[in-house]
Amino acid sequence: MTATENSIYVSDKAKKKVHQLMEDAGVGGDDTYFLRVGVVGGGCSGLSYKLDFDNEVKPMDQVFEDNGIKVVTDLKSFLYLVNTELDFSDGLNGKGFYFNNPNASRSCGCGESFAV
């Protein structure tokens, strides 16, 4: 399965960091684990992103694979995340994962929340 239009994408930098974090969490070699991405209420712009490792796909989950990373999200979150790219920055202006979300009408200064 590869990413197509209407998907969630993973940059090369994010892929490298996800693999490192999976190794650190002790699930690096376990193919049953994947990256769960979600959207929850909160943050200064109203909605926040949530990332976690999981190994249980729920009935209404949307499953994608891009750049060798399996990404799963619930259907409600996917409506906010369609065609979003997960990226990672280790620069001086901020370190961590961030989302290039074409659906966000605005985002906060810290980049951890957004509005549509």
Image (spheres, rainbow, N blue to C red):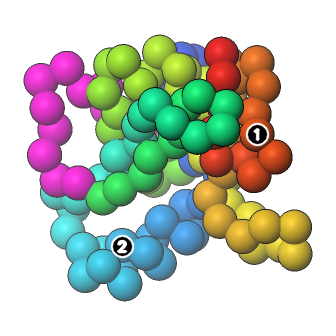
**Residue 40 painted magenta:** no
Of circles 2 and 1, which is in front? 1
Residue in front for this viewpoint, 86 or 93: 93
Q: Where is residue 110 in the image (x, y as percent from the top left)?
A: 75, 52
Q: Position of residue 34 (x, y in %)?
A: 30, 53
- Secondary structure, mark 1, is loop
* Residue marked by disc 1: 108
The amino acid marked with disc number 2 is Met
Residue 98 to residue 65: above or below = below
Q: Position of residue 71 (x, y in %)?
A: 39, 43
Q: Where is residue 53 in the image (x, y as percent from the top left)?
A: 30, 58
Tell me which segment is drawn in magenta.
54-65
* Residue marked by disc 2: 22
Residue in front for this viewpoint, 97 or 71: 97
Residue 13 to residue 1: above or below = below
Crowding near pointer 1: few (<14 within 10 Å), some, many (20+)? some
The residue positioned 43% from the left and 52% from the top of the image is: 51
Q: Which of the 4 image quarters holds residue 108?
A: top right
**Residue 59 painted magenta:** yes
